Each structure stands twice: as structure tokens, then as C-alpha cells.
């Protein structure tokens, strides 16, 4: 059985506090806030970023716009 590799990238503010995280696998990227809440998903095959409510669909990888 072959497992897909998942990578995590953390983002910090100027004080070193974690403000968000992106999980990346072969087909998608997921962005989470500092509390671990999912904010949006980027689908690599469709080249669309969709927020968790589905109310925003953006062309390209726009995940960083969801980090506050």
C-alpha cells in the first residue's frame, strides 16, 4: 500500500505566533487558521480556490488571502 505524502507549512506573525497552516497533498491544499479551523481549499486540477462556505470561488491558488 502506497501512502500519499502530506506536507505542512506554518505561518507566523512578527512575534513568532502561528497564524495559519497549509496542508499540501498531491491533489489539493488546505488552509487552516491559528485555531485549526479549515478556511479554504485549493484544488490543483481545477485551479480553483474555494472557501469553506462555498460562497467564494477564486481562480488560481488564493489561499494566503484567507490568513488574517
Image (cartoon, rainbow, N blue to C red):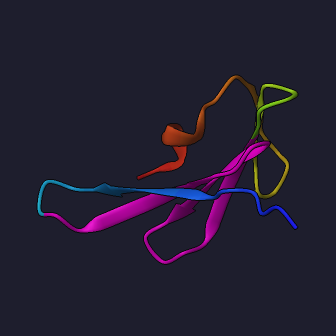
In the rendered image, residue 26 lying in the magenta stretch gets the answer yes
Closer to the camera, 51 or 29? 29
- Residue 28, quarter of picture: top right
Indicate the position of residue 13 as horizontal and vertical percent values.
22, 56
Residue 39, relative to residue 28: is it above or below? Answer: below
Residue in view at x 48 percent, y 77 percent: 35
Instruction: Label the magenta part by its dominant secondary structure.
Output: strand
Indicate the position of residue 49 as horizontal and vertical percent values.
73, 36
Residue in view at x 41 percent, y 52 percent: 68
Residue 61, relative to residue 68: is it above or below? Answer: above
- Residue, far front: 1
- Residue, far left: 15
Residue 17, relative to residue 7: is it above or below? Answer: below
Say which quadrant the N terminus sits in.
bottom right
Indicate the position of residue 15 as horizontal and vertical percent values.
11, 63
Total residue callouts: 0
Specify the segment rendered in magenta. 16-42
Judged left or right of residue 62, residue 1 is right
Judged left or right of residue 18, residue 38 is right
Residue in view at x 54 percent, y 75 percent: 36
- Residue 9, quarter of picture: bottom left
Indicate the position of residue 50 as horizontal and vertical percent values.
78, 42
Residue in view at x 16 percent, y 64 percent: 16
In the rendered image, residue 23 lying in the magenta stretch gets the answer yes
Amino acid at each position: 500500500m502506497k501512502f500519499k505524502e502530506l506536507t505542512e507549512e506554518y505561518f507566523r506573525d512578527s512575534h513568532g505566533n502561528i497564524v495559519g497552516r497549509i496542508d499540501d497533498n498531491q491533489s489539493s491544499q488546505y488552509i487552516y487558521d491559528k485555531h485549526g479551523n479549515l478556511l479554504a481549499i485549493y484544488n490543483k486540477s481545477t485551479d480553483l480556490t474555494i472557501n469553506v462556505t462555498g460562497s467564494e470561488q477564486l481562480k488560481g491558488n488564493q489561499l494566503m488571502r484567507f490568513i488574517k
